[in-house]
Image: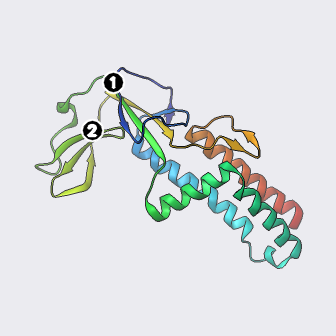
Amino acid sequence: MTQPLLVTNIQIKSGPSGVSGELVGTDDPVAFSEAFSSCVAQVRSVGDAVLKDKDANKLSAFRKWRETKKDECKNDDLMKFINDRRNDDLHEGDGCLSFTMHPYKFSSEDVGTALPPGAVLRVSGTGAYWIAPATPDDRHPCAIPDGAVFTVAIIDAPTVHKGKPLTGSDPVTICATAERYYTELLREARRLFE
């Protein structure tokens, strides 16, 4: 899914300029965005499953531990980010990724016939799309064969976790670090309360 960065002198951006997160490369921004959203939702679900376990919540020691962990998450930049991004994505349809398309060979002839008929070709940081005038939200992605690469970064990426600077702020590192946190949370709960 990710690939080494390739930069050209032409950049077509999606999202605000001055994105703070580190970049990773992808050849499919739509699939990358969907995978990132899925990862954030699934990682957060693990935390919810641990902290809301009905059987464990019958134990007073677990309830005290749970409140400590909830406070820890509320005061942690990375965990607040995961919680907020999951909620924004799920409830608002609002993404936090910024894409930049780096075309090094692009021709409108490469993208095929307009779908649907009469559609207009638009190019953004997430790629080239056919957009029907009657339904501007209905986008039909165009394949750009060997003509562009994409970089992706997180808008306002977290930089601190557990009081220490994160090792990276790119989307892959953010998801992997959050997954490790919740895996450790699950292991700690099992060790203490199983």
Direction from residue 53 to residue 132 in the image, left or right? left
Quadrant in which residue 44 is drawn = bottom right
Q: Is residue 194 visible?
A: no
The correct choice, above or below, for 170 with respect to 105 in the image is below
Q: Is residue 48 visible?
A: yes
Identified at 15% across, 58% down, the residue is: 134
Q: Quadrant of the C terminus?
A: bottom right
Direction from residue 25 to residue 189 in the image, left or right? right
Nearer the N terminus, badge 1 or badge 2? 1
Total tally of numbered discs in the picture: 2
Q: CA distance from mark 1 to mark 2?
A: 12 Å
Q: Residue beneath label 1, please?
A: 10
Direction from residue 35 to residue 11 in the image, left or right? left
Q: Residue beneath label 2, please?
A: 123
Q: Secondary structure at mark 2?
A: strand
Q: Amino acid at mark 2?
A: Val
Which residue is nearer to you in this view: 147 or 68?
68
Identified at 61% across, 52% down, the residue is: 81
Identified at 27% across, 38% down, the residue is: 123
